[in-house]
Image (spheres, rainbow, N blue to C red):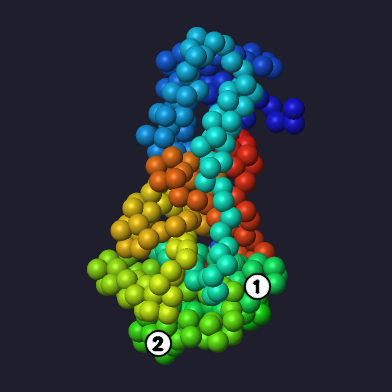
Amino acid sequence: QSTPPSTGLVGRLFRKSEAAPDEPRRALDDAMLEDLEDMLVQADLGVETALRVTANIAEGRMGRRVTSRELKELLAAEVARIMTPVARPLPIYPKRPQVVLVVGVNGSGKTTTIGKLASQFKAAGKNVVIAAGDTFRAAAVEQLQVWGTRAGVPVMVAAQGSDPASLAFDAMTRAEADGADLLLIDTAGRLQNRQDLMEELAKIVRVIRKKDPSAPHNTLLVLDATTGQNALGQVETFRNLADVSGLVMTKLDGTARGGVLVALADRFGLPIHAIGVGEQIDDLDAFDPEEFARALVG
Ligand code: GDP
């Protein structure tokens, strides 16, 4: 009972129309459902998912009078129901090295996420190698070296502008020689020239498959929660560029509640392997659907 019923996303729907002091009630009627839909769209769920969530809440309950608290519970349960199947940590395969290709637009948090993942796996006793595959961005390479040092993980780099695929090949060779458990490969995120990027990613995949036909074992798409609905377009784009197997959503520590994750889960069903909750090395959490649903509903 610490939060008054009239705060948060759901609370606002009640404050608007009724002034009862403690537990205002509203009938689940068309007007209420429309308000709920609008609220969910504003929270970045997108129209399609907002409609589906609202319909599921309404089903069998039309005309019933609910309190803000009851509606919050219904909504949180519905969001958790959608999110539970996609909350899955990065699967670990017996294959060594397990090759994880990390893709996403520049600025989404790829470099940072690779640093955090390297640190987590290192702490879990895994032998990790990083490849700085965005060879065009000197800053990204330097940043990755900083993360490697922090995590205590070697970072393979190549001369600026050199072929990322040949770096990936060298990194595979090194990871195999070292008996590494995990090879994390950073990639370029220049969406300005999709054709180039597609060819670059395809070449990386081709080359590492010469070493291991089952690689890459995971292709992680890193998304920035603050970009809201843009994340949907980024998934569409990267699914065409690479065989995306899972998502990491970064910057969920800010004001973004990450409502777009519900839309992503609803539309694509891709696993959410982790969420970024800050700029420090330990700021990578497992995705917890119940906690997420509660935070989203407010
Ligand atoms: P890249 O271009 O995709 O490699 O992105 P970077 O890893 O360089 O991250 C871009 C910016 O986002 C940097 O300033 C990071 O510190 C910041 N960043 C990355 N992940 C998070 C996160 O989970 N929370 C916050 N607050 N900032 C993040």
Residue 104 left/right relative to 283: left
Q: Quadrant of residue 4?
A: top right
Name the residue rendered at 44%, 75% in the picture: 212
Image quadrant containing the N terminus: top right
Name the residue rendered at 38%, 54% in the picture: 235
Residue 93 left/right relative to 35: right
Residue wearing tag 1: 126
**Residue 80 at least partly seen:** yes
Q: Residue 149, relative to residue 226: is it above or below?
A: below
x%, y% of residue 185? 47, 74
Q: Residue 79, relative to residue 166: is it above or below?
A: above
Q: Quadrant of residue 122?
A: bottom right
Name the residue rendered at 42%, 65% in the picture: 103
Q: Quadrant of residue 277?
A: bottom right
**Residue 148 at least partly seen:** no
Name the residue rendered at 70%, 31% in the picture: 3
Residue wearing tag 2: 160
x%, y% of residue 19? 60, 15
Which residue type carries mark 2?
Gln
